[in-house]
Image: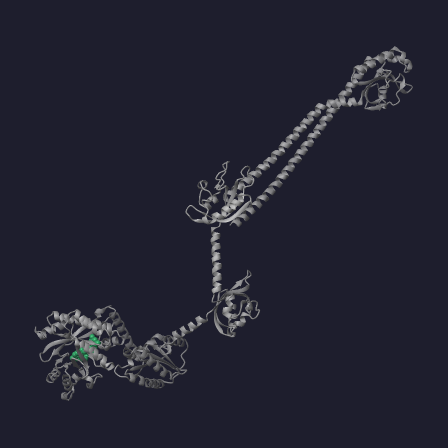
Amino acid sequence: MFLEFIVEVAKHTMNAHERQKSHASKNHLKNQLRQVISLVFLILFLVVSFFYLNFSWNRYKRTAASEAVILAQSLESMIHPEHIMALSGNLTDLTKPEYEISKTDLMRLVKTTNPLRFAYILGQKNGDTIILVDSKPPDSTDYSPPGQIYDEIDPSYLIPFQSGQTILTEAVTDRWGTWISALTPIKDPDGQVLAVFGIDYSAAEWQARLYRQMIPDCVVVISLFLLVVLLLYVQTKKSVLKTLSDNLAYDEALYHNIFTQAPIGIALVKGGTFVVESVYGHTNINPIFEQILGRTSAELDNLSWQDITHPDDIEKDLELFARFKSGEFNQYELEKRFIRPDGSVIWTHMQISKLIGLPGRNTWHLCLIEDITAHKEAEQKLSESERSKSVLLSNLPGMAYRCLNDRNWTMQFVSDGCHALTGYLPKNLINNRDLSYNDLISPEYQDVLWQMWTETLANRSSFKYEYEIITASGEPKWVLELGEGVFNDAGDVVALEGIILDITDRKAVEEQLRYTAEHDLWTGLYNRKYLENLLNREAERPLTGRTAIIGINLNTMYLLSLTYGFGYTQTVMRTVAEALSEFCSETRMLFSSYEYRLVFYIKDYKNRDELESFCEAVARTLSPFLTAERIGGGIGVLEINDNNRHDVDRMLKNVLLTTEKSMKHDDSEVHVLFFDETMETQIDRENRINRELVQISEGINSERLYLQFQPVLDINSNKICGFESLARLNSESLGIIPPIEFIQLAEKNKLIVPLGDVIIFKALQFLKKLEANGYSTISVSVNISAIQLMRDDFSKNLIDRINRWQINPTNVGLELTESIFTSNYDEVNRVINGLRAKGIKIAIDDFGTGYSSLAREREIHADYLKIDKFFIDKLLDANQEGTITSDIISIGHKLGHCVIAEGVEHESQLQYLKEHGCDMVQGYWISRPLDEDKAIEQLNRYNQGSNC
Ligand code: C2E
Ligand code: CA
Ligand code: CA
């Protein structure tokens, strides 16, 4: 800023200087012109003066001449021609009175008439000019006796003799001196020239007289001349003054503009205080100064500069100022901070210098300040950025470089990180001293890198590439290079710059992550994601040969894990995966698609038979594991075709559902099922139901799940003694769904737990309602799935609720199917015993169809046996007596159970059951399952007020 201003001012000054120069040259021209004019004027004046003086001179000369002539003529008139005629022109005349008279006259004449020096009368005798009489006394050396021949005579003296005219001669020199003579002829009465009368003036005196006459003229001329010179001088001075005043005005304007407009604060300071105004009324603090300090001149008037100097800078400033005042130096500069009225700090570059040229003000000095806050901030930022750059460079997990764009990547600069990254020192690489960077790059990447850089530079984009280098110790290292080309103005690449980072660790983690992302950690097999990607990739290609997905569902293992824990099932799954891996080949890949589910991806098989026999082989391999664990499994096969291959998600879902379908709960066989389209419709239906069940379990549309109640008739009293609650689902899109369908689904998805909770809640509500209606001994039973029963909190929750609601637990019945006992017999018994201890009644449902043979029945601790409808239907056969139904009843009784017959539709059946001592019956013959109100109505009807 300051520099800029200096440059500006310099320019300005140079311009001003230039202008001044041109101004000066113009002035110079004007001056010259003025001088020429003055000179011409002077010359003109001199010429005029010369002519004037010349004229005067001539005039005086003429006047003198005519006076001399007139004098000569008038003197001549006093001379008597008779006297002259009397003279003979020889010494004899001395004696003549005429001579005497004439002589005396002439002598008197000369004496009395100034400035005459001689008077004489010349005559002619014998062709010579002789002096007849002169004015000199005879004792004078200049005396000429009469008749003396005037042999030095100037010819002009003869003119009066010849012309009879009076003349005035030029200065003539003879032995007496230099004279100017006036000669006038003396004529006789006839007009004949007798002699010539002459008077001589001393030429010197004549001249002197003339000069004397010229004195006034000369004085006038000289005076005028002096006046003119004076005038010219004044004029010249005036124009010089004008030029000077112009210069001053210019300087003043320049100064004023600079003072008010310069981006530099200017102030005059006297000692410690600011001189706000000079004695001449000039402002001594410019607007920028006020602006920088944030204070007006008036405010500054009351302040000393120490007051507004930042405390950290005051010491230095005072020290410099003291040295400055002592005369140690004429100026000093300082970067210092001022404090503004709002407390903010402003950085300035200050220059203090002596104020030169102010008379009598030598204690004042000039203070220039420039706002360098921005510059300081930038400086700070720069140093910050320099610092962070060096921190960055020294902590870079790699190296920064600048290299040439050549095949060697000739390094021009390499940061210190080079050593840690490559094992070589920067100097080894710079200018390829010991080796080039290209030598470090793994050979398989060298060409690729060149290719990539070439493209990058052509596009002027950024370079980013991961590759391997071989370090000094021969160890391969993964690096990430990030760089850019450096171009000159012509657009040519001059260098490449960037950083090369060590990403070996990241690569290892990436590798690990990729492995984790692609593999199932239990089995080590590729996971579902990988399978999906593979199938998606395959879907892009044309279908060649036959391909299929074979799903293997072992999710029954889940039940195992409930008993033995996850670690156990994990180990089983791993062993299974290992066993199945034996089947893997180029055309058979094994994946772990979900928990407890595996998938084979089969390619290039010949026909369905081959697929079937492969599945059977798989089933055989699985068998030993499953039989040992007494669990089942399912295999589902989906053949890939052009219709289904593009929807990988759906394919996988369908194959999974096929495996589920193929599973049967009640055996440990592995069944194989091929997927077909009708299955998909079924699957779709199941999906819908599932979605609704999920919603209900979350409390949404929960009224769609409701209960009906089927009365149980006590055969002996012919009264209703209880109700079985049966769940109903009124699906939004599918209408009423039979429980056989949705309960199974809920069990599969484990939704039966929350749904079962809702069911128990509603059943107990009904029980409370019965109580409210006065039926305190009528029981309500609820069907309970294995998954529900096996939950740790099941018993506790149920008992808590019974207690809370103050329900008689003996009115609460739980119906458990036989299959419950297949999985974990002892555990089930333990739970049942706990419940029974609280008074809750347990019924074994569907008795006779399940796993629990009569053999084990004795070990099951239940209150009721519900004979399955299968055996009741049998009673309709022709040979009713041949059935085992009566045996079942009596065994039940023997074991201490109360026996209930289910599905009684005909009177004959009821009859038989009565005869064979069955305790209770349930079936359409008595009543279909009823809604709550209807059920109570029915109860009222049957029991007719009696409290059963
Ligand atoms: P279940 O426990 O054996 O229930 C008796 C089934 O027989 C009921 O079928 C009932 O309507 C039907 N039934 C009763 N008398 C007759 C008759 O005279 N003739 C014929 N043909 N059928 C008769 P529903 O309601 O369809 O229930 C089917 C099965 O769904 C039940 O068999 C039970 O295993 C299960 N279920 C029903 N509700 C629930 C429940 O809330 N929880 C659980 N876990 N399972 C339930
Ligand atoms: Ca039942
Ligand atoms: Ca049943």
Q: In front: 130, or 782?
A: 782
Please say if 837 is above or below 283: below
Q: Is 925 on the left-hand or right-hand side of 595? A: left
Q: In front: 168, or 208?
A: 208
- Percent x, y of residue 186: 84, 15
Q: Is residue 736 visible?
A: no
- Percent x, y of residue 716: 9, 80
Which quadrant of the view contains residue 151? Answer: top right
- Percent x, y of residue 307: 45, 44
Please say if 596 is above or below 1: below
* Residue placed furthest toward the top: 97
Q: Is residue 209 visible?
A: yes
Q: Quadrant of ligand 1?
A: bottom left
Q: In front: 654, or 889?
A: 889
Looking at the image, what colour scheme do you see? one colour
- Percent x, y of residue 723: 15, 75
Which quadrant of the view contains residue 838? Answer: bottom left
Please say if 606 is above or below 139: below
Image quadrant in which the C terminus is located:
bottom left
Q: Is 25 on the left-hand or right-hand side of 531? A: right
Residue at (64, 30) in percent of width and height = 231
Residue at (16, 79) in percent of width and height = 863
